[in-house]
Image (cartoon, rainbow, N blue to C red):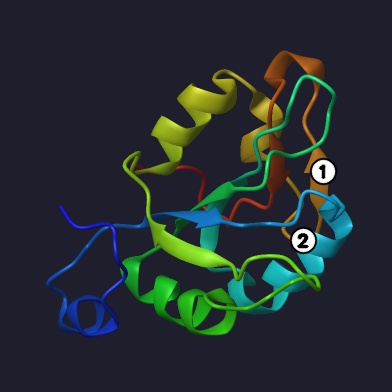
């Protein structure tokens, strides 16, 4: 499958994928700054946001978002894709992830962490060391689904 977001295919129901990779996040941005950028476009519309971290604890410049349904991608894509978040940085690029579903993201970046499913929907919280390599930016009510 193509990894490019096709708004028409989503709106027609032809594309039912729900997980995106968000590339070109400035490494100097804090989790609070990312929350501010993403927050307006994803409020109550996603299951999980994963921001992989380096061994030094900083994020690595990309993240994954699993949305509650394909239509929620449209608002996020429209608001975020192509946005330059810092001077001299590449524009943010939103594409479909090869990994699809919140459960797959949770398994890849921190399986078995009960804190992920109970995250506060309005904040970015650093995950415990048992889930190294991940920040969580909300879980929509209703829990994870794949």
For label 1, the residue is 125
Q: Classify 81 as above or below 131.
A: below
Residue drawn 57% across the image and 83% down it: 79
Give the mark toward the camera: 2 or 1. 2
Q: CA distance from mark 2 to mark 1?
A: 12 Å
Q: Looking at this rendering, what residue extends furthest in the front direction?
A: 88
Q: Looking at this rendering, what residue extends furthest in the top direction?
A: 130
- Mark 2 residue crowding within 10 angstroms, few (<14) / some (14–19) / many (20+): some
- Mark 1 residue crowding within 10 angstroms, few (<14) / some (14–19) / many (20+): some
Q: Classify 78 as above or below 1.
A: below
Q: Quadrant of the C terminus?
A: top left
Residue 34 is marked as 2
Q: Quadrant of residue 101?
A: top left
Q: Check disc 2 and report its element: helix, strand or loop.
A: helix
Q: Quadrant of residue 53?
A: top right
Residue drawn 42% across the image and 34% down it: 103
Residue 54 image position (x, y, % from top left): 73, 27
Q: Classify 100 as above or below 79.
A: above
Residue 138 image position (x, y, % from top left): 68, 53
Residue 28 image position (x, y, % from top left): 85, 52
Q: Is residue 43 left or right of residue 57?
A: left
């Amino acid at each position: 499958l193509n990894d490019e977001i096709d708004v028409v295919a989503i709106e027609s129901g032809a594309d039912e994928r729900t997980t995106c990779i968000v590339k070109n996040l400035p490494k100097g941005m804090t989790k609070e700054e990312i929350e501010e950028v993403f927050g307006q476009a994803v409020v109550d519309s996603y299951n999980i946001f994963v921001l992989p971290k380096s061994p030094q604890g900083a994020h690595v410049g990309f993240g994954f978002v699993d949305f509650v349904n394909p239509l929620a991608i449209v608002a996020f894509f429209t608001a975020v894709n192509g946005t330059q978040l810092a001077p001299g940085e590449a524009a943010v690029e939103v594409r479909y992830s090869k990994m699809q579903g919140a459960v797959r993201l949770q398994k890849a970046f921190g399986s078995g962490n009960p804190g992920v499913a109970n995250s506060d929907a309005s904040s970015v919280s650093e995950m415990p060391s048992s889930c190294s390599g991940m920040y969580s930016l909300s879980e929509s009510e209703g829990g994870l689904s794949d």
